[in-house]
Image (cartoon, rainbow, N blue to C red):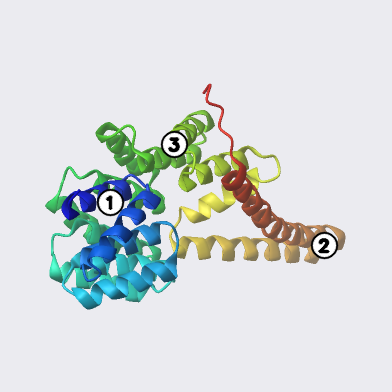
Amino acid sequence: MNHNSRLERAWAHYMADRTSAAIQLLKELLGEDPNHAEYHSLLAACLLQDKRLHAAEYELGLALKIDPQMPFLYLLQSNILVFKNKFKQALAACDQALALAPEFIDALLKKAEILLLLNQYAEARSCLDQAARISPDNLAVTLAYADFHLTNGDIKNAETFALEALHQDAQNETANVLMGKIRLTQGNIQEAEYHAKFVILNNPNSEQGLALFSNIKARTNWFLGLWWRLNNKLANSTQFKQITYLICAYLFFNLLSQIVEDMGHKSLSDMIGYAWLGLVVYSWVAIPIYIKMLKKELDNFQFNRDF
């Protein structure tokens, strides 16, 4: 089999999340031609997908030395920098990719994703609109819009785009996970669970599917349910609203406690203070319990194939 055929197979394996097979082919190709930038770049992408961050950085460095004009390399660099929480540098890498290829959809979507992490909603929306103008029927763009609106707390528009994404590809994992998140936020547990199970049936190792399933269990758990609702409410709000909610809650409890004490009800005032303390402790205790539940699902999930 010639080099081009094996490279195409490696790309196909990578796109289908079969990174082990892709890596094996790329090792063979690099053994025959160690100075091929695309081989190194795709190997870096596979290693990053397997969360082998340092190995991915090494391969990316080799690729950049061979051909620093490949836009895909800067997209990879941006992904690595996001893993390292270096968001400003990740944005700069996206800009480098776009300078080389102004209509590089994946770089625009990555830039929008990073801007969302930085709470720069208008700038993120601008990137999505630019991507939509370039490729209006692109499934990745539709999914990005759904995620944007969900992150922004606009459930109605998030649902519209998620439904459109499912219309484009009903089997798509990300589309089903997004719809599951939306249904869970709306309180439609049955449909949320359907989407989670659909994802896991098709990909038992899907971390986002298993995370969704864990969120469903947390939402329906008697102890974690209230915490999940509060956390989800905050997570689907802007940073300013999150801060405002927390400050208002703190001021409300303290003001109420002071008013009750001034009215001569010291015991009741103390109870209100203890209630606030209990809420704080509850939020702390719930987090490790949720993380433990998520880890358990990721490690030991067993799916009922009669579903």
Q: Amino acid at mark 1?
A: Ala
Residue at numbered disc 2 = 270
Q: Earlier in the sequence, mark 3 or mark 1?
A: 1
Q: Is residue 255 left or right of residue 132?
A: right
Q: Is residue 61 left or right of residue 153?
A: left
* Residue 153 pos. (x, y %): 41, 50
Residue at numbered disc 3 = 199
* Residue 288 pos. (x, y %): 67, 57
Residue drawn 24% across the image and 57% down it = 106
Residue 265 higher or lower than 70, as above or below: above
Q: Dot 3 lies on which element?
A: helix
- Residue lying furthest top: 306
Q: Could you give the CA–CA distance between mark 3 and mark 2, rounded to whole angstroms?
A: 49 Å
Q: In the picture, residue 118 is in which quadrant?
A: bottom left
Q: Could you give the CA–CA distance between mark 3 and mark 1, rounded to whole angstroms?
A: 24 Å
Q: Which mark is residue 10?
A: 1
